[in-house]
Amino acid sequence: MTDTERDLPADGSPWDSIVPRSGEEPPTDRRWGGPGSGPPVPVEDLHYELVGRPEPPPVPNGWYAIAASSDVAAGDVLSTIAVERELVVFRSADGAVGVLDAHCPHLGAHLGGGTVVGSCLRCPYHSWGFDVKGACVEIPYSDARIPARARAGRYPTVEQDGMILFWFHVGGLEPTYDVPLVEECQDPGFSDPYEFRIELVASLQDMAENNVDYTHFRFVHGRASLDASTSQFSTDGPFSTVIERFDDADLTFTRWTWGPGMALLRVPEFMTMHTATTPIDRRHVRLLWNFYFPPSTVALAAEIIDGVVGPHGLLADVPIWRDKVFRERPLLVRGDGPITEFRRWYAQFYEGR
């Protein structure tokens, strides 16, 4: 028997020199991924610094949905992240709703851990009480005058059409426009809302531009390309309107946009979509979309919604938005649609930065 044969285990394996015997410490050399190297690091856990990848645009000013009305019952407090901030929304005992910055101005406790008592949200740390406008109205352990600066940052709030809307302006200005009521939400001739929610990796402006990017309908959604003869884009202050005709499907729809976050899409006698798209941060958005149907199409609701948000609709756009970068000066050609006009209109929502 040779020395080599003497060193081999009974099964003739040549790996005895690197596989540790019972009680032995495994090798520490991890360069080649052998024993002792540990499992491979998942790709999504690796972080690389890339040169030249532009930042998405900032969060624009406007009205956004922080929650559905049904999410926040009387006495509830809801913590969330939106417009790059930690926020809380709460409903007082009398039904009023407030949207505040999440951290108490006293010593910084998170108000999401607090409780609603009567008309106030009480901080979990020292029980300071804040009303729906953010003002501190009670410090239970002190008889001193409440400081004027004892205010939680507040966001103007309205509740309509089954949504709690809040106004965001980076410069702190009050609302400059209103979001119109949606007729179908109160019309007994339409169904109750069919709700769709999702969070996506996408820049809010990239999603908005999609509506005037005529050519992508062919290559992403498999429909005939639109052009100036089948689409119209017009603006009126903070509002915009897109009218599109899909000849291959024999339908026309109108999409009204109220600022960067709220929109209504109506296909007559077929479907109405009331959409709220809220930026979580520059790269992520949260969708709260409600679909309404007349009696003639309510039986087809699930099929219609799948056509809008399924693999041939919204979900076909998702990987594009996820991986694309925002071109501040895109290279546009004839046929791209009114992207330049759209950007000129959209720029107003970055005022005050």
Image (tube, rainbow, N blue to C red):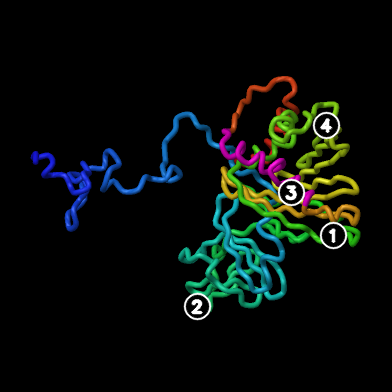
**Total number of numbered labels?**
4
Give the magenta range: 303-325
Q: Residue 307 magenta-drawn? A: yes
Q: Is residue 53 left or right of residue 172?
A: left
Residue on which disc 3 sits = 306
Question: What x and y, as percent, mark residue 14?
Answer: 21, 41
Residue 341 seen from this side: no
Query: Which mark sits nearer the N-terminus, 2 or 4?
Result: 2
**SS at mark 4 in the image:** strand
Residue on which disc 2 sits = 142
Q: Depth check: 96 or 204 in front?
A: 204
Query: Which mark lies nearer to you, 3 or 2?
Result: 3
Whether residues under marks 1 and 2 lie with C-beta atoms below 8 angstroms apart, the answer is: no
Q: Residue 274 magenta-drawn? A: no
> Tag on residue 191?
1
Residue at 91% from the left image edge and 53% from the top image edge: 296
Query: Which mark lies nearer to you, 1 or 2?
Result: 1
> Tag on residue 18?
none
Query: Which mark lies nearer to you, 2 or 4?
Result: 4
**SS at mark 3 in the image:** helix
